[in-house]
Image (cartoon, rainbow, N blue to C red):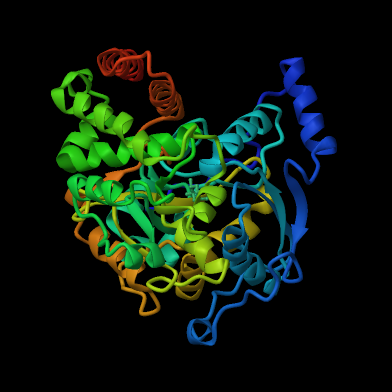
Amino acid sequence: MIKKKRPANARTGPATCWPALLCLLALWLGWGWNGAQAQSLPLSSSGPASGVSLSSSSSSSPVPPSSGGGSLQVLHWWTSASERQAINVVVNQLAKQDIQWRDVAIPGGAGMGAAKVLKSMVLANRAPEVTQLNGVVFGEWADLGLLLELDNVAVQGAWEKQMFPTVWSLLNNHGHVVAAPLGIHRINSLFYNTAIFKRYNLSPPKTWDDFDQIVKKLQGSGITPLAQSAEAWQLATLFENLALAESGPAYYRRLFVEMSPAAYLDARMLHILKRLRGLSAAMAQPVRERPWTEVARSMVSGEAAMLIMGDWAKGELNAWGMEVDQQFGCAPVPGTGDFHLYSTDTLAMFAGNYAHQAVQETLARLTMSPAVQSEYNRIKGSIPVLRAADPHMDRCARDSWRAFSKGPAWQAPSLVHRMATDDTTKDAIVSEVQRFFLDRSISEEQTQKRLAAIARTLSRNRND
Ligand code: GAL
C-alpha cells in the first residue's frame, strides 16, 4: 500500500525568513554566489564534461520515459574531474528528456561545506529541488516532512527486488522511500603506486605489520610511504578504517552506530588511537590540510607510495588517464580485506513545490536505470546499487562488489560519510580525532575519555 504524498501546501521552511543573518545568507546564496565558491549554473550536454555519454554497451538498456520538460536545481559536492564527468551521465540523460539540471556545486570533500549550505538554504526557505544527501541524515529531513516520498517510483521500478537490501533499508524512512540511489563507495580502499612497489619489490599490505614493513623499506628513499591530508574528514577516514581493522564490523557498530561509551573505553580504542598517531611517521611532515585530489596526485606522481581513500580516488585517477594495475593498484586497507566500509551516494528531493514533482520523479527513476548505474559508477569509481553484478566492473570494483554482496555482517557504515550516525555526533567525533592527531600534548587516554563522553552525551540526547 502506497501512502499518499504530502499535501501540496506542505511548507519547506519557516513562514518568515528568520533570523536576519539567515536572510542575508539566503540573499547571498541567491545573488552573490560566484564560481570560486559554487556554481549555480545550468549544466547541459554541452557543459564542462560534455562528451560523456552512455557507452554503446550500456545504452542498449533504455532509460524509462518521463513526463518531459522542466528544470531542477541540484545541490551537491561533486566538483573534481571524475565527479563532474560522472554526474554528467545523469545530466545528459535528463537533457534528453528536456530537463535542465541547474547546478549548485559546493566544493569540499565529503560534503563538509555542502551540509552547512544545505541547512542554511532550507532554513532560509530556499531549499533546492534536489540535493546530494548521504546516509542516515536524510531521515532527519524526512522526519520534518521536507522530503518527497518516492514510493510510486520505487514500486514501479521494483527497487526493493533489484537493489542490495542494505541500500534499500537506508533509503527507507518509516516505510517510505525518501531518496534515490546512485552508487556504493568502498572507503577501506588502499591505492598504491605500481612503479614504486615494483622498484622496491613490495606487495600490497594485508596486515598493519606488513604496512610497517613497507614503511621501513622506504626509509631513506625520499618517498613518503603514505599520502595524507590533515583535513578533519581525511584523518577520520584513517580512524574509521583502523577501528574496522581492529575488531571487525560488530565492534565498529558499537562505536559508531550504537555510540556505546563502554566501547570507547575498551582497550581496543587505545590501540586504535596509538596506531593512528603512529601512522604520522609514514607521512610527509608537517601534515598539511589538502583537498583529497591533491593527496591522490601526490601518490600517482611518485612523491608518496600509498593512499587510503574512498574509491572515488580510483575514478579520479582514471579521469587523469591512469588505469588500475597499470599506473596504480588497489587493495583493501590492511586488516579489512573481508569487510566493506561503505558509503552510498543518494539524491533526495525537497517536497516544497509540488510543481516539480513529476520532474523529480523522473530523476529518481533515471538513477536506477541499469544503463545509468553502470556508466555513472564506472566513471565515479563506485559500484552500482543493483544486486546483479555489472559485467563492466574493473578489478577493484569487482572486489568491492564481492565484499559488499556478503551482506550486513561484513559491512560497516562509514562514520565520516554519514552512514552511521547523525551529523552532530559525527562532527564531534571527527574534530576530536583531528585535534588528537595534530596536538601531541593530548594523550591517547584523554582522547579515549573525551570520545566516551561524546558518546554518553549524544546517545543520551538521542533517546530523550
Ligand atoms: C563522499 C561522496 C563521494 C565523493 C567524496 C569526496 O562523501 O560520497 O561521492 O564525492 O565524498 O568528496
Residue drawn at (57%, 58%) of the image: 83
The structure residue drawn at horizontal position 16% and vertical position 28%, both measured from the top left corner, is 268
Residue 29, picture quadrant: top right
Q: Using the rendered image of the protein, determine whether residue 67 is visible from the camera's viewpoint.
A: no
Say which of 68 and 51 sits in front: 51
How far from the left and from the top, in percent, is residue 461?
36, 15
- In the rendering, at what x and y percent does residue 244 appear? 23, 41
Q: Kindly give the residue lying farthest to the front in the view shown.
A: 220
Q: Quadrant of the C terminus?
A: top left
How many numbered tags mark residues here?
0
The answer to which quarter of the image holds residue 363 is: bottom right
Q: Position of residue 34 (x, y in %)?
A: 81, 42
In this rendering, the answer to whether 278 lies above or below 61 is: above
Image: 372 above or below 436: below
Q: Decide which of 371, 204 is in the foreground and name it.
A: 204
210 over 153 or under it: above or below? above
Name the side, left or right, on which 28 lies relative to 394.
Answer: right
Give the camera-side residue of 376 and 162. Answer: 376
Q: For this view, does 418 lie left or right of residue 39?
A: left
- Compared with 69, 258 (above or below) is above
- Give the image location of residue 277, x and y in percent: 32, 29
> Is residue 123 shown to the viewer in this render?
yes
Q: Is residue 437 left or right of residue 297?
A: left
Residue at the image point whose x is 68% and y is 74% from the top: 96
- The residue located at (49%, 82%) in the rendering is 58
Q: Furthest residue to the right?
A: 31
